Image: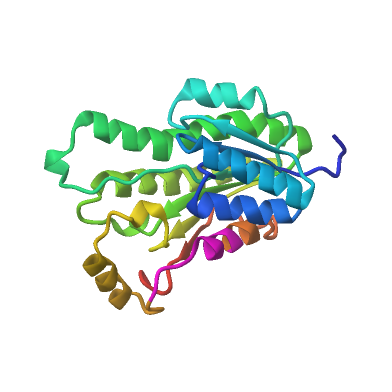
Amino acid sequence: MSDSDKYALITGASRGIGKAAAELFGANGYHLILTCSHSMNELEALAKELEYTHGITCLPVQADMGCEAHVEQLFTRVHSLDILVNNAGMAHFGLLSEMTSAQWHRIMAVNLDSCFYTCRAAIPLMLQKHRGRIINISSVWGARGASMETAYSASKGGMNAFTKALAKELAPSNIQVNAVACGLIDTAMNSCLSPEDMESLREEIPSGRPGSPAEAARLIYQVAHAPAYMTGQIITLDGGWQI
């Protein structure tokens, strides 16, 4: 390992935004640590493809990012880190009055607790280098709230506050913390929406379409390479939807 080696950890990387981000960081010479909770075959195939195509190392790890023990075990395999992308997440559609406590706690664990676990473990590695970038993947609903998605909205609102507070804590150490708040992105997370619901959403979005995972990945990469003076920001990618 040389001083010029660059390492990025991307959670939830087997598909969607995480996969697109892994492809972009890999194409730019980053060695990668990629996680998924279930789709290990897809993640291993991605890792092999990126290693072969770009000549990097790529470590695929199956881990539940909402489980403290899994994250601690993951970080026993991470020895150097420049970029952390907290992308792992899950949605829940339904009335709050019909939601169980277990469902509520699961949403919070995967979407919010995971950021605490990964950041706590990543910070010492970044302090060793006197630099680092943490990028949390949030949602427009974290600022505005969405009917039928109260738990999801609350978890992303918590992520936004977490981002702003941790940015203040780490700025003196040259570690920047920002979030990308996505609007409607064409990923599997939105596959539960009916064609009628998707068409209704398209009509609301000034750009007239959902964003692509590749577009989200490009913004994540740009945030990872933004001036060091940019920290504590929640940057929205939504086609003009929530202006």
Q: Is residue 58 left or right of residue 143?
A: right
- Asked if 53 appears above or below 48 in the picture, the reply is below
Task: Report the front residue among 108 and 43.
Answer: 43
Residue 179 visible (yes or no): no
Residue at the image position 70 percent from the left and 32 percent from the top: 125
Residue at x-position 23% and y-position 49%: 93
| Visual colour scheme | rainbow
Residue extending farthest to the left is 97
| Residue 15: % across, % down | 50, 49
Residue 214 is one of the magenta-drawn residues: yes
Which quadrant would residue 172 be assigned to in this image?
A: top right
Residue 182 as seen in the image, left or right of residue 82: left
Left or right of 43 on screen, residue 101: left
From the image, which quarter does the C terminus lie in?
bottom left
> As drawn, is 12 to the left or to the right of 193?
right
Q: In the rendered structure, which segment of residues is drawn in magenta?
A: 209-218
Magenta stretch: dominant secondary structure: helix
